[in-house]
Amino acid sequence: MPSTPVRAAPPATPSATPLTRARVLAAALSLADAGGIESLSMRRLGREVGVEAMSLYNHVSGKDDILDGIVDLVFGEIDLPTSTTDWQAGMRHRAYSARDVLARHSWAASLMQSRTSPGSAMLRHHDTVIGTLRRGGFSVTMAAHAFSVIDSYIYGFAQQQQNLTYTTPEEATRLAESILEQVPATDYPHLAELLIEHAVTPDYDYAAEFDFGLELILSGLQRLAVTGLVT
């Protein structure tokens, strides 16, 4: 008799990925990036990771804990100065990295400085920034001033840029031209002059304003250091 062919066993179904705090926070970060903080709820987050909302409480204590967690994830994406970096180069590199991170996570700028339960990435970030300024010759008080003014600029610029209605230089030019049509030069001469000579030029890019402001702040702090006013 012919032998009965042996059928291969069906492949085993892979087990579901275990639910962990890290997985919950990663999903929450994705939801916030896609729809903003307003779209983030325990029920929706539960659906995202495939569990009932109540199961999330085995890993997070609530929405505030989730917000603390995803803010810490964002802080962890910002490049930090090394211990051998010149303070200006370190602050410059961190500022550009923070600007790019905040552009990826448009909801984060309004929350980064408001959390009262900092995570390890946030603490490491702040400690490294302060340490870089202290090694640069700043007193504790002046390091606090410098940290405040630099971060106020970074976060403020990020929020202002997110409120823009255009994303490319070409769109910026078209918007400026549209505004210019509604701005009689005889009534608003200075505004019209700025639009004509600056905002509607082919190479205008609002993002470049970040460079000017940051260098203004860093050079001002450097002048204080040279004159001995940072002690």
Image: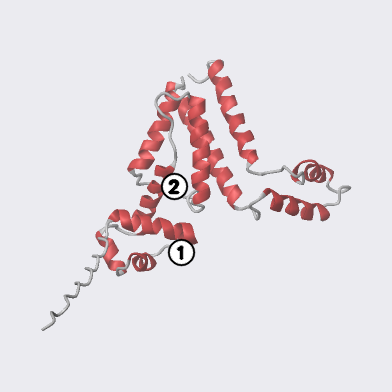
Q: Which scheme is used to colour this image of the protein?
A: secondary structure
Residue behind mark 1: 39
227 or 6: nearer the viewer? 6
x and y, in percent, of residue 144 in the image:
46, 30
Disc 2 or 1, which lies upstream in sequence? Answer: 1
**Residue name at image x 47 percent, y 57 percent:** 33
Is residue 29 among what the camera can see?
yes
x and y, in percent, of residue 89 in the image:
51, 27
Is residue 145 among what the camera can see?
no
Q: Residue furthest front?
A: 1
x and y, in percent, of residue 58 in the image:
24, 60
**Callout 1 crowding tier (Cα within 10 Å): few <14, some 14–19, many ≥20:** some
Type of amino acid under label 2: Ser
Q: What distance separates the C-alpha of mark 2 from that of mark 1?
A: 19 Å
Residue behind mark 2: 114
Judged by depth in the image, the label closer to the viewer, 2 or 1, is: 1
**Callout 2 crowding tier (Cα within 10 Å): few <14, some 14–19, many ≥20:** few
Secondary structure category for the residue under label 2 = loop
**Residue name at image x 64 percent, y 34 percent:** 212
